[in-house]
Every structure is written in structure tokens, then in C-alpha cells.
Image (cartoon, helix red, strand yellow):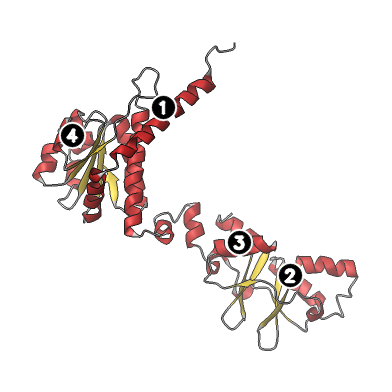
Amino acid sequence: MTSTIDFVQSAKRVIEIESRAINGLYQYIDENFHSACELLMQCSGKVIVCGMGKSGHIGRKIAATLASTGTSSFFMHPGEASHGDLGMLTKQDVVLAISNSGETSELLNLLPAFKRMAVPIIGMSGNPKSELGKHSTVHLCIKVEEEACSLGLAPTSSTTATLVMGDALAVALLDAKGFTSDDFALSHPAGSLGKKLLLRIKDIMHSGDALPLAHEQDSVSHVLLEVSRKKLGMVAIVDDKKTLVGVFTDGDLRRLIDAQVDVHSTAIADVMTRNGKTTKEGVLAAEALSIMEKHQISGLIVTDDEQKPVGAVNIQDFLRAGIM
């Protein structure tokens, strides 16, 4: 059965309305926003985010964003706060209270407790003259002209505007604190972003007995055995001082087969690749991967400051580590 509803047009209408709501926030990025940021910057405790219903869901996301971008924060449910969770609040904290109407009873019931502890309150609502607005230390307006819900009932544009205002706070603080990508990685060690920003070559390289190694005077057949044993598709070739002088790879082997070279009588020095690409163990794994992709190679020898091989990595190591 074919529906008479135009789903595409309905979706476009929602996006258009919510886009207008976001653009409408520009007028509220003012001295109040600056004051809110100052309060949060001066906070020596945590930012406690509170909100009921849909505002609570958005509040959880704002708290998570603040925490992951260098501002210590957590979400406190207003209902649970009245039954003991207020014990988590200290005088060093700042409260970010969210209510679109500014009249949410569960949130307003907490205001006396916040006041007694002299905790600054950043209120976020669509009505500066609401009870929340009047009792806030600083009020951030998130008023929208209309909800994207065709009934005008479900929080849609208002929750989007709230989330965007929260993101604006978090990023403004991030910039002010000089929060870096390394700082971000420390709070995201298990994610792909964290791996790209934290993992270094030394964390994934093959070293010690696992390092494929041969002398430049060894025969090709001897080196092929080393390739087979270590299973990395390459071997580091060194001289008498154990300094890297070349590398022998699967690609070199294919060229040998085409040239019909005698693998038993030919020294590896005659057929190896000289001046191959290398990396250091302290280099970020993501940076080393970029080198490999740029030069279309599948592995790298890792050397120390004296150009002596200390490890090796191939494309499979990056896959296992979740870098690609």
C-alpha cells in the first residue's frame, strides 16, 4: 500500500525549522554567554548538569562533551538529586540547569539547596523571565520560534538549540584552555581517535627475535628463509657494524623471479632495495601509516639514532591496532 504522506518533504521541513532555530542562537551569544564561560573557567570543582525529560537527555550529552574536552563534568538527575544525589555537589562546583520552559518543578525544587551552598547556577531556558531565569547567576537563552514537530508539542527545535548552546560552551572553554589533540586522546584511549593520537610505532612494532634481519653478504636463499620465518614480508639488511644498509621485500622477490636470479649464489646486497623508507619507534603510528600510504609500501623498518634496526611494522600491524 502506497502512503500519501510525502516523507521527504516532511523531513526537509524539519531540517529547515531546526536550522532557523540554530541560527536564532546568534543573538544570545552575548555578555551572558561570556559570563557563563568565565564562571566555568573559574570553577575549581565540577560542572554539574541537571535537566528533566528531553532536557535531561540533552544534558547528559552536554556533560559528556564537557568532560571529553577538558571541563570536568557529570550529569545529576533532578529526581535522584532530591533523594540523596545532592550529596555529590560541593561548594566548588557550578550547576548548569536546563529547562526549556524554565518552570520544571523537579529542577526548581533544587534551587534552594543550590542557593544554600552558594553554588553558581547557569540557567539554560527559553524564557529569561521564568523562575529558573530569575534565580540563575547567569542565564543563557535558548528560545526558538517553533518546534519542528508538526503538532508543536514534541521537543525538537528546542532540544537541538540546547545541544548546540552546550557545544558552544564546551568548545569555547576548550579553546580558552588550550586543550590539545593529545589531551583529547587521553580521555578517549579506547576509541579509534585515541588510538590514532596515542599509539606509537614502539607499541605495535616487531622487535627482538621477531625482527627479520640478515647480513648484506648472506645469500638470497638465506634471506628468503628469514622472510618465511618472520612472516612480515620484508627483511632488514645490515653491514658488519649492524647498521641498516637496505631492505628486501616481497616486491624485490617478485622482481628476482622475473629476472631468473640464482638465489643460492647471489648475495642479498646485489638485489636488495637501498635507501628504503624507515621510521623511528617514537613516531605516531598514524604518522608512519601516512608515510606508507604516500609511498605505496606495505612495511617499514624501525631504526634507532645510529641507523641500526630495532623493529619492523607492516600493514597488518596497523589493521590489528585499529589505526586504519
- Mark 3 belongs to which amino acid? Ser
At a point 30% along the width and 37% down the height, the residue shown is: 27
Q: Earlier in the sequence, mark 2 or mark 1?
A: 1
Establish if 223 lies above or below 37: below
Q: Which residue occupies the extreme right position in the image?
A: 260
> CA separation, marks 2 and 1?
62 Å
Q: Which residue is mark 3?
A: 290
Position of residue 5 in the picture relative to residue 61 (left or right): right
At a point 14% along the width and 51% down the height, the residue shown is: 91
Q: Verify CB contact (< 8 Å) between mark 2 and mark 1.
A: no
Q: Verify CB contact (< 8 Å) between mark 1 and mark 4.
A: no
Q: Earlier in the sequence, mark 4 or mark 2?
A: 4
- Mark 2 belongs to which amino acid? Val
Q: Earlier in the sequence, mark 3 or mark 1?
A: 1
Q: Earlier in the sequence, mark 1 or mark 4?
A: 1
Q: Is label 2 in a helix, a strand or a loop?
A: helix
Viewer-side residue, 131 vs 70:
131
- Mark 1 belongs to which amino acid? Ile
> CA separation, marks 4 and 2?
71 Å
> CA separation, marks 2 and 3?
24 Å
Q: Where residue 191 sits in the image (x, y, percent)?
A: 47, 52
Q: Which residue is mark 1?
A: 17
> Is residue 9 something that shows in the picture?
yes
> CA separation, marks 3 and 4?
52 Å
Q: Which residue is mark 2?
A: 227
Q: Where residue 100 sits in the image (x, y, percent)?
A: 27, 30
Q: Is label 4 in a helix, a strand or a loop?
A: helix
Which numbered dot is residue 316? Answer: none
Quadrant housing residue 111: top left
Establish if 249 lies above or below 161: below
Which numbered dot is residue 132? Answer: 4
Q: Is label 3 in a helix, a strand or a loop?
A: helix
